[in-house]
Image (spheres, rainbow, N blue to C red):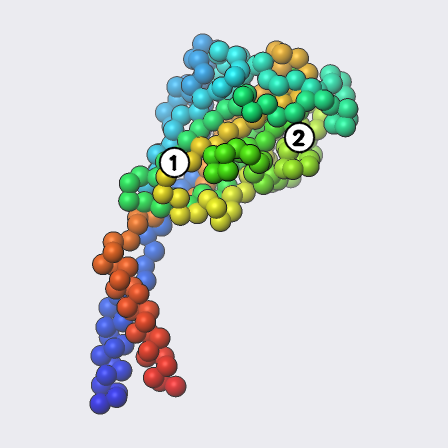
Amino acid sequence: MKKMLLLVLSFWVGSFPCRSFCQSFVGTYDFASVTASSGSTDPSTPPAAAGVIFGSFTAAGLSSNPNASGRFSFTTNALGGVNGSDNFAGFTGSLNPAKYYEVTLTPNGGYLLDLDAISFTIQRSGTGIRSYAVRSSLDGYSANLPASISPANANLGVGAADEFQYLFDANSTAQNGSLVTLGAPFDALTSAITFRFYGWNAETAIGTFSLDNVAFSGAASPVPEPSAASLAMAGCFLSFVVRRWRR
């Protein structure tokens, strides 16, 4: 009798295996349609992925139009850098919360959104920004998100409080490697989340802050139906009973 019950329970549990419906994605903004007259909103088609809606990048508190094509680049950034100097201790600027680029990601109805990382290309003009950071709406944009340079790039660094740094004034070419790593607070999101990119310590008002190839990596998964969740819980419980009974 005991063997028969074990057989029945094992068969029933095996009928409801745990299955993953996560759909991984990398959504990249290439700003292909940006021009010097396209305004403060990126007119390019946003990335697309199942389970998530990618909004368009917008600029706030900056010049009314980009100063370049094919990347998100604006002037009138927060000042404070010293032209010709690479001594950050001598810079006087700070993050201006009214000057930023922002973009919103929204889970589709019935989906959970997990966000893992943001990577992007950074560029400045000869008198452009020397410091930059990324924040999110999860904490009301109060703290910089975890910053690192990966792959390694000798032209970029990370200072105190996760502040990215464009290390050399003489270099104004596009630089890869800026990476923001997102942790547990960015898992199982059910509502929209906005990210803001701030640049400061520009050397003149015409100095630029440019973003390109901004890539969001993560996964979206359907919210389990209550019946499926109940069966999964029952299955786990019965699996536990079977294991205990076999001892």
Snapshot quadrant of residue 232:
bottom left
Kindly state the secondary structure of the residue where label 1 is placed. loop
Q: Residue at horizontal 63%, vertical 37%?
A: 162
The circle on residue 192 is 1
Q: Distance between the residues labelled 1 and 2?
A: 29 Å
Q: Residue at horizontal 44%, vertical 32%?
A: 194
Residue farthest toward the top in the current orientation of the protein: 37
Which quarter of the image is occupied by the N terminus? bottom left
> Does 115 sit left or right of 88 as displayed?
left
Mark before the other along the chain sequence, 1 or 2: 2
Residue 220 seen:
no
Snapshot quadrant of residue 228:
bottom left
User: Three-letter amino acid code at disc 1?
Assistant: Ala
| Nearer the observer, 128 or 103 | 103
Which quarter of the image is occupied by the C terminus? bottom left
Q: Residue at horizontal 54%, vertical 21%?
A: 98
